[in-house]
Amino acid sequence: MAAAAVVVVNKLSYCYQQGGKQILKDLSFTVEQGQIVAILGLSGCGKSTLCLCLGGIIPHYLGGAITGQVLINGRDTVDCKIARLALEVGMVFQDADTQLFSPTVEDEIAFAPENLCLPPERIRQLVDAVIGMVGINHLRYENPNNLSGGQKHLVALAAVLAMGPSILVLDEVLAQLDAAVKKNITELLLELRRRGKTIILVEHDLEAVTIADRVLLLEGGMLVMDGPSSILRNKELLAGHKLL
């Protein structure tokens, strides 16, 4: 029996300004529960824009001209309030500074559960759990503004995990991490998949996305390939798409 499709993208097109350059062009694909799907492509191909569409940031915050449909757990992102979507789709942006604003890492992770009015004891449990899970206990009392780019991504990931979303959209979370931390986070993503989380992973590092079940390749805003991660071993194919 096939797993349920938790993400459905149907003929999605988008441009940031009415009549402007089309960034996404007629994209259609689905993602099943418990899959890790990697999105690859050269800079400017529309990867980050697609992430913003999946999280409902487009069109609720950025506007622009959007056609087609994005369904998250059966709900159309256009019709679903952003606060509701945030409980289902946890996003870590390419620029983590845009989502970090609390004075300490601990406060950052506690912010969303506090706004959900969870009991203080439950909030402490969540904060301790995700700090341990992501391996950032040594950063607990640091100001996020003073951290490195890679550390900021880890804090943003921990804050997202505290919300308990079923879908994670991670835009280059692994890019600025050293080899040891990258290995730990990769193992964490695999464990989250085992727990039933669905993960959409945007990365430039081809080695980092070998954990994916599927690979989507974007070129010029269009989906030009959708296949198993084994295609990453096809050097000729990758070179033909300028990924090597």
Image (tube, helix red, strand yellow):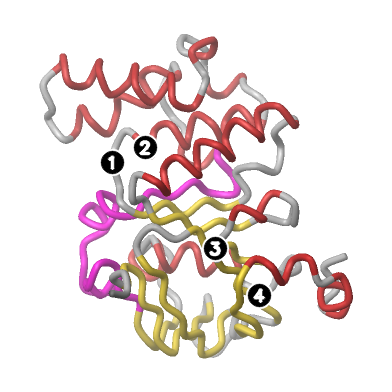
- Asked whether the beta carbons under mark 1 and mark 2 sit within 8 Å of each other, the answer is yes
Residue under label 3? 213
**Residue 35 position in % (x across, y down):** 44, 61
To which residue does mark 2 refer? 161
The question of residue 122 being in magenta is answered with no
Query: Which quadrant would residue 108 be assigned to in this image?
Result: top left
For residue 155, side relative to residue 211 (left or right): left
**Residue beneath label 1, please?**
164
Give the number of the disc on residue 45.
none
**Pointers 3 and 1 in contact (CB under 8 A)?**
no
Mark 2 or mark 4: whose residue is earlier in sequence: 2
The location of residue 71, given as percent across then percent down, is 30, 74
Q: Judging from the image, what secondary structure is the residue with disc 2 in?
A: helix
Assign a secondary structure to mark 3: loop
Residue visible at 41% across and 66% down in the picture: 54
Tell which tag, 3 or 1, sits nearer the viewer.
3
Which residues fall within the magenta stretch? 70-96
* Amino acid at the residue labelled 3: Asp
Q: Which residue is mark 4?
A: 217
Q: CA gap, disc 4 to disc 1?
A: 28 Å
Query: Circle 1 sits in a helix, a strand or a loop, which is it?
Result: loop
**Label 1 near label 4: C-beta < 8 Å?**
no
Q: Residue furthest front?
A: 1
Q: How far separated are the C-alphas under marks 3 and 4?
A: 14 Å
Task: Tell us which disc is closer to us: 3 or 4.
Answer: 3
Q: Quadrant of the C terminus?
A: bottom right
